[in-house]
Image (cartoon, grey):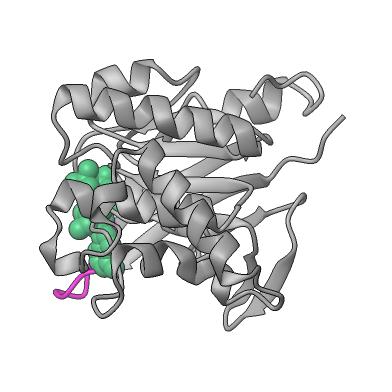
Amino acid sequence: MYEPLLIARGLTRVFKQPDGGERRVLEGIDALIAPGARIALTGPSGSGKSTLLNLLAGLDRPSGGHIEWPALDTWPGENGPRPRGVAQVFQFASLLPALDVLENVCLPRQLEDHPPPFDALRDEGLRRLAAFGLDALAHKLPEELSGGQAHRVAMVRALMARPRLILADEPTGQLDHATAQHFLDTLLTEADAADIALLVATHDADIAARLPRQWRLAQGRLHGANEALSATTPAQEAP
Ligand SMILES: Nc1ncnc2c1ncn2[C@@H]1O[C@H](COP(=O)(O)OP(=O)(O)OP(=O)(O)O)[C@@H](O)[C@H]1O
């Protein structure tokens, strides 16, 4: 028996339009993420993948429905609880421009209440960068990186934070096929070792096919996710 990392019921997200109208992006979405889950999130451009990731991370509030994070601590955000232990890797990497790559990836742990000694942290950062083939970039500034390199560094930073769940938005969007496959191999290895669940939004069918569970957004509805919530108990649900 386990507690789900996340349960969403009836999520709806409506955006106001400049002309005063409304755009209903997500409609009645149910979803469950089990510890260690490996899920691909697909759907056409504009179907609401990033919007859904922002809701599941607690960064945005749904217009209707609700989300719980049963297995995670939460802290009181301005508009409701937000989960600890969820790392989000955005579509456009958000590295701090004044810090080099190694400093960027070590930062989340340095901000902890009881940070590890910096030497140990630096060694871990270098090991993780090397796993992704990025160690030669350790002392470069973000402005010296390509988009694909910056995105991979942002993923290393997410892993360094030791989350229970990573929500990744198009992590291979700027990578060639071979680099994307190697990136996913490494990500799966690192996530397995640390028991991190992954939800990966992607347009790359080869990347999506390598994840055992598939969610698909189309016309506001999420297909492939609510079955897990309604048809199985958590104990039966396979990651
Ligand atoms: N803050 C916002 N205000 C108004 N509309 C928004 C906002 N955020 C997203 N939208 C709209 O919601 C829709 C879904 O956008 P979203 O970025 O979630 O799609 P996506 O599936 O991630 O697209 P892509 O694959 O191109 O990244 C789009 O029509 C977008 O313009």
Residue 17 magenta: yes
**130 displayed left or right of 56:** left
Residue 175 magenta: no
Q: Main secondary structure of the magenta part?
A: loop
Residue 56 appears in view: no
Tell me which residue sits at (49%, 24%) in the image. 224
Q: Indicate the quadrant where residue 7 lies.
A: top right
- Image quadrant where one finds the C terminus: top right
Image quarter for ligand 1: bottom left
- Image quadrant where one finds the N terminus: top right
Q: Position of residue 118 (x, y in %)?
A: 56, 70
Pick the front one: 7 or 129: 129
**156 displayed left or right of 38:** left
Q: Position of residue 69 (x, y in %)?
A: 69, 53
Farthest residue, direction right = 1
Q: Is residue 116 above or below residue 227?
A: below
Q: How many marks?
A: 0
Q: Is residue 171 above or below residue 193?
A: below
Residue 167 appears in view: yes
**123 displayed left or right of 76:** left
Q: Indicate the quadrant where residue 96 lies.
A: bottom left
Tell me which residue sits at (51%, 37%) in the image. 198
Q: What span is in magenta?
A: 16-23
Tell me which residue sits at (73%, 40%) in the image. 4
Q: Position of residue 2 (x, y in %)?
A: 82, 34
Pick the front one: 128 or 230: 128
